[in-house]
Amino acid sequence: MAAQNLVVDSSPSHVLNTFSPIRALGAAVDRLGLGVADKELTGPMLQVILDSGWQSITYRQNTELHAEAWHWNPQGVWSDPAERGYFTGNANPTETIRHSYGYALPHRGTTRASRGGATYFSRLTDGDANSYWKSNPYLTRVFTGEDDALHPQWVIVDLGSLQPVNAVRIAWAEPYAKTYFVQFWTGGEQNPRRATAGLWQTFPTGSVNQGQGGTVTLPLTRFQVPARYIRIWMTASSNTCDTHGPADRRNCVGYAVNEVSIGTLATNGDFQDLVKHVAGAGQTSTICSSVDPWHQASDINEKAGEQVGFDFFFNSGVTRGLPAMVPVAMLYATPEDAAAEIAYLKKRQYPVSYVELGEEPDGQRMLPEDYAALYVQWAAAIHKVDPNLKLGGPVFEGVNEDIKVWPDAAGKVSWFGRFLDYLKAHGRMPDLAFMSFEHYPYTPCQSKWDDLYREPELIAHIMEVWKDDGLPPNVPMMMTEGNVSSRGGITAVDLMGGLWLADYVGAFLSAGGAATYYFHYVSNPLGAGCGDNGGGALTFLNMDRDYKMRGHLSQYFASQVIAREWVQPVDTDHRVFRVSSDVRDKTGNVLVTAYAVHRPDGQWSLLMVNKDHDNEQRVNIRFHDATSGEAGAGSEQFFAGPLTVVNYGAAQFQWHSAGADSYADPDAPPVKTSMSAGAQTSFVLPKASITVVRGGIQGGSQSGKSGPK
C-alpha cells in the first residue's frame, strides 16, 4: 500500500492553541452510589484511577438534574427552626464531611418518573389539593430589582396527543397570578423544545389582567382548538403569602398553583377534564419554568446516591493536590448557601481553580434571562467571599447545534446569545470568567463506528457556535463533562470509545478549547444505561456489581496514550499545530486524523487516529514551515533520529459481549517501541488504532534545530 500524507503546518505564527496538560486534561467525579467513594477513592483502586493519566478534577453536581436541593454540608441552618424552609450549609468546618445528599423539592412542577419515588412527580397534576407548585422567589423583583414581567414564569401541560381544548381550570394557591395568559402551541405534535417549530398563541379569551386567585374555570374560545401543549404564562403576582407564612419574604413572592386542568367546557357548564391527576406514574406531564427551593429535613433522598463530601473529596488524593473545579447549587438553592460553601472551602484551604454555577439549565427548560438573573445574584454573593474566584457556566448539556428558545420581543432565539446579552446589559460580563458545556455528540445507545468520522467536525462546529453567539474571545471554553453519548452503550466501552476519546481531545484542543474533563473518572458496573449486551455505563474500567475491577476498557488505555504519551504531564505550555490528512476512503471520509503538539522538551508529538477498522494505513509525515526557507518558499522537515512510537488498537483490545459478564480479551496496555527515522521513513498505523509518534525533526533550513533538549 502506497503511503499517504500527513502534513503538519509548523509555522510558528500558525499556532492553533497553547495549553498545559496539568490544567487542560482532567476528569470528572460525579454523584456516586452509596459506599462507592469508599471503594474507589481509596487504596489500590484510587491508584489505578490516577494511573490513567488525567490530571485536574471537576466535581460534578448531579442533584440539580434530579431537581433537588443539595446539602453540600449536612450541618447547617434552616430558615424555619422546625427543620424546614431554606437551608444554608455551615461555613465553619466542624466534623469531616464524607457524604452529602440531595433533597426532593415539595413544590416541584416538572414530571420526572422513576427518580426516587412519588416526590419526583409534578405537584400540578398529582390530584392533591394541598400540594402545589411554586416558582423560584429569586426570580422576582425583590431579588432581581427588575419588573416581574421581565421574568415571566410558566407551566406547560402536555396532553400526550392533540386533543380538543376550549377551557382551563386553575386551582391557584398563594401567591397567585394577577396577570396571566393561557396559550396553545401552534406546532401541533412538535415538542415546544423545538423552539422554532411553532409559536405560543394566546387563546381568544385566554388573557387575564385582574386575577383574584381561587379556583377559576376559564373559557378560552367559542370553538374547540386541537392542541397538545398548553402554557400558562404569568407576568404579575399577587405577592400574597404561601402556606409557610409571612415570616420569610420568599414565601410571599412568585406564583403558586395547586392543580391545573385542561379540557372542554360545555354550554351547560360541564367541564370535561383531559388531565390525569395521579400522584405518581401516569399523571399528565407538566414542565415548569422554575421551582421554589423550599424543602424540609424529611425530603432527603439517599436512595439516589451521594455527592462525595468535600473533605473526603479533597483529602482522598483524587485531586492530586491540584486546584479543582467545584460547583455551587443555583437552580434550587440560595446565594447565601453558595457563599457559605465557598467560605468553607477557603477555611479548609482547599485549592479551587474554577466555580461552575448551576447545572444544565437548558436541559431543565430554564429561559436564559432567568438563569442569568440567578447567575448575577450568585456571582455577587460568591465574590463577596473571594473577589478573585473565576466563575462560569452555563454548563450546557451535550448538544451539536445552537440551543434555541422561544423568541424574545426582538425575535432572538439563541439561548446562549440572550444569556450573554443579559450579562452585558447589566454590566456583569466580568463575572463570566469561563464558558462551560458538556459534550455528548451521539444519540444515546445508537452510536456506530461510522460516527467516528464526524467527531472533529462536531466539536469544532459547536465551539464556533458559542463564538457566533457572542462569546468574547478572551473567555475560555471548557468541556466539563463528556463522552461518546450521555448513556454510553457498547460503543463507549468497545474500541470505538477509545478512538473517539483520542480524536475528540485532539480536535477540541485544535479548536481552541481551554480544558476538557473525561467522564466518568470513577467507574460503574456495566449494563446500566442502554440495556444492550455488555454496554451501558460511561466508564473506563470493567467493574462487577461489588465494584471489584475485572479489567480495563478501551478508554482507560486511550487516556494513558493521550495524557502520558502524546503530551508531557507537566504544567508547562504545549503548542498545538494543524495537521492536514489526505488519507480518505472512497466516500471522502478522513480515515486518519492527526493532532500535533510541540512539547516543552523540544519534541514534536503526533497523535494519530486510524478509523479504518479493517486495514492498516501507511503514512508519510512532513512538517511545513511557510515562514522559513529561501525566498519565502517555506521549508519541509521530517521526523529524524531516535523516535518513540506508541500503539494502541485492535491488537491490544477486543470486546466480547456477554451481558453482565462481558469482558475484553485481549486487554493489553499500549505498546511502546523505539525506532530511528529519516527523510524516507513512513509509518504504519495499525487498523482501528491510536498511534503516537514523537521525537525530533530535521530537514530544510531548520535541520537539526528541533531535536530533543
Image: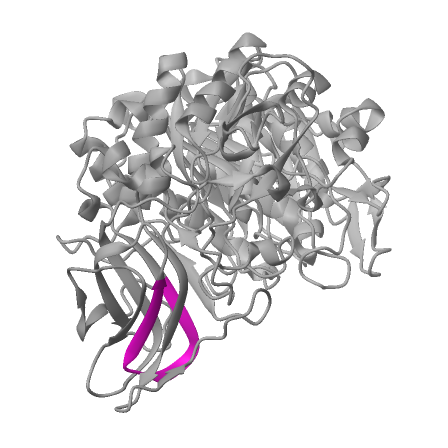
Image coords of residue 574 (percent x, y): 48, 20
* Apparent side of residue 583 relative to residue 527 in the rendered image (left or right): left
Q: Nearer the viewer, residue 403 or 137?
A: 137
Q: Position of residue 300 (x, y in %)?
A: 63, 41
Q: Decide if residue 365 is on the left or right side of residue 129.
A: left
68, 208: nearer the viewer:
208
| Residue at 60%, 19% in the rendered image | 568
- Does the image show residue 605? yes
User: Is the stretch drawn in magenta largely helix, strand or loop?
Assistant: strand
For the image shown, how many numbered marks are present on the structure?
A: 0
Does the magenta-highlighted stretch encompass residue 161?
A: yes
- The colour scheme used to paint the residues is one colour
The correct choice, above or below, for 415 with respect to 614 in the image is: above
Quadrant in the rendering for residue 388:
top left
Q: Is residue 433 visible?
A: no
Which residue shows up at 67% across the image and 21% down it?
97
Any magenta on residue 122? no
Image point (29%, 48%), residue name: 415
Q: Which quarter shows the C terminus?
A: top right
Q: Position of residue 235 (x, y in %)?
A: 21, 52
Bounds of the magenta span? 156-171
Residue pushed farthest left?
Answer: 410
Above or below: residue 526 compared with residue 602: below
Toward which corner of the image does residue 578 lie, by quadrant? top left
The picture places residue 449, in percent across and down from the top left corner, at 61, 59
